[in-house]
Amino acid sequence: MDYFAKRIIPCLDVKNGRVVKGVNFVGLKDAGDPVEIAKRYNEEGADEIAFLDITASHEGRGTIVEIVEKVAREVFIPLTVGGGIRTLEDIYRLLNVGCDKVSINSPAIANPHFIDESSKRFGSQCIVVAIDVKRTNDRWNVFINGGRIDTGIDAINWAKEAADRGAGEILLTSMDCDGAKNGYDLSITSQISSLLDIPVIASGGAGTMEHIKDAFTSGADAALAASIFHFKEIEIMALKHYLKRQGIAVRL
Amino acid sequence: MIGLIDYNMGNLRSVTNAFEKLGTRIEIVKDASHVEGYDKIILPGVGAFKDAMACLKEREMDEAVKAFAATKKPLLGICLGMQLLFEASTEFGKTQGLGLIEGEVVKFDTTRFSQHLKVPHMGWNELEVVRDTPLFKGMAPRFYLYFVHSFHVQCDEKYQIGKTTYGYTFASAVQKENIYGFQPHPEKSHENGLAILKNFVEL
């Protein structure tokens, strides 16, 4: 019997110190204070918490460090931060306040060597490479800059390269599915999960408990979602009980 | 007072945060000559075994930790800090460890796995109590903790206090007299982890 648990990761999109949530990367709604929400998720049974800093201005960047520092004093589960991480110094500042992992998106595409450098310096376990993908026919392209720019790079090849360069995990977001609540993109999730020896976090599209179960049966090691948890459409503990009944190992 | 060994391997903040949450004072120890003055010490660690041993030696922490262990005061190694308590690791050739507990640190042997699983073993898994010890006071017979590692300890069953299954069963918690080691991260393991640390405070 295997007890290794599939992980449920609520994600907080943080802008200028507040949690926001949009649909298809646009149209943001205020969803509250990140520290309070992180504490709530922790009490409700989240396995990790992810923060995605979507603050546009450079001046606003420091706020995510302060938020994580506050959360880490109260919340004793792994914390991941993404958004705006470009340098080893950015990573160091976050890890130093109690963050456990960072996710790197566009800067990894711009400079793939950053994955090698950061994983050598801090260990693969704390380097997550975030990949935003969009489907065109039978191919998925990697998009950057919050989904605005098509790099033309094949997502499967890029995921493989990121893993080879030392990424400890892949955070795979389908931009076609994100915010639509019609389920994760199971095809690309399954292809990348079966190809790689590192964990894959499915992201974008969760609307029901069944969608999350489907992500796990498609090979994802963890499922990330934002709005369904923020707006209490799905309660984490109820979700975990459902998954357990479906034969999926979860931490209860 | 509890001392947390700082040898420049990984961040200590999560550990200090956890003890602060428990209302216990903990100090970061950078100077090897101060180690002996503490009632208990914690050897943390994230990263590679070889680098960690080099950092410990550079700060003369290796001898200080060994001398502390000999006083019979409680010592807790976490994750890489647990692995360092053993004689050697096969990570990048063979590197000598502190040798406080007989045994070796080896990479997960995926050829022995009962199913396809990813390495590192990263996430929540169950620790099954195999021997009662004060650190498990008030705990269930098996409970979830957070793991992040690619190597694990191989040692005599007499030192195993907890075991975990990932592909196969390995020693996830050990004890030899006053020396304790946990492969998972209690400081990142929610209430179960805090309960173990509280039990360590109360030893």
Image (cartoon, grey):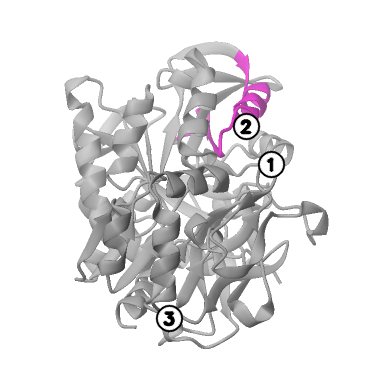
Q: Are marks 1 and 3 in contact (CB under 8 Å)?
A: no
Q: For residue B71, which quarter of the picture? A: bottom left
In x, y percent, where is residue A52? 35, 35
Amino acid at pointer 3: Leu
Q: Position of residue A171 (x, y in %)?
A: 52, 37
Task: Give the mark toward the camera: 1 or 3.
Answer: 3
Q: Is residue A46 visible?
A: no
Q: Nearer the viewer, mark 3 or mark 2?
A: 3
Left or right: residue B14 compared with residue B162:
left
Q: Which residue is mark 1?
A: A197
Quarter of the image that includes the N terminus of chain A: bottom right
Residue in the image at 31% along x and 48% along y: A98
Labels 3 and 2 within one chain: no
Q: For the residue labelled by badge 2, is the local secondary structure a helix, a strand or a loop? A: helix
Image disc number at residue B135: 3
| Cβ atoms under marks 2 and 1 closer than 8 Å | yes
Residue at image mark 2: A163
Disc 1: which chain?
A
On whether residue A109 falls in the magenta region, the answer is no
Q: For residue A171: magenta?
A: yes
Q: Position of residue B184 (x, y in %)?
A: 50, 63
Residue A58 in view (yes/no): yes
Question: Is the residue A135 above or below the residue B171 in the image?
Answer: above
Which quarter of the figure has residue B165? bottom right
Give the magenta part as a residue range.
A153-178
Q: Residue at x 36, y 32 (%)?
A: A91
Distance, label 3 to label 2, CA atoms, is 37 Å
Q: Tell me whether circle 3 and circle 2 mark residues in contact (CB < 8 Å).
A: no
Q: What kind of element bears circle 3?
A: helix
How far apart are labels 2 and 1 at the CA level? 8 Å
* Rendered image quadrant of residue A42: bottom left
Vertical order, A5 against B52 (above or below): below
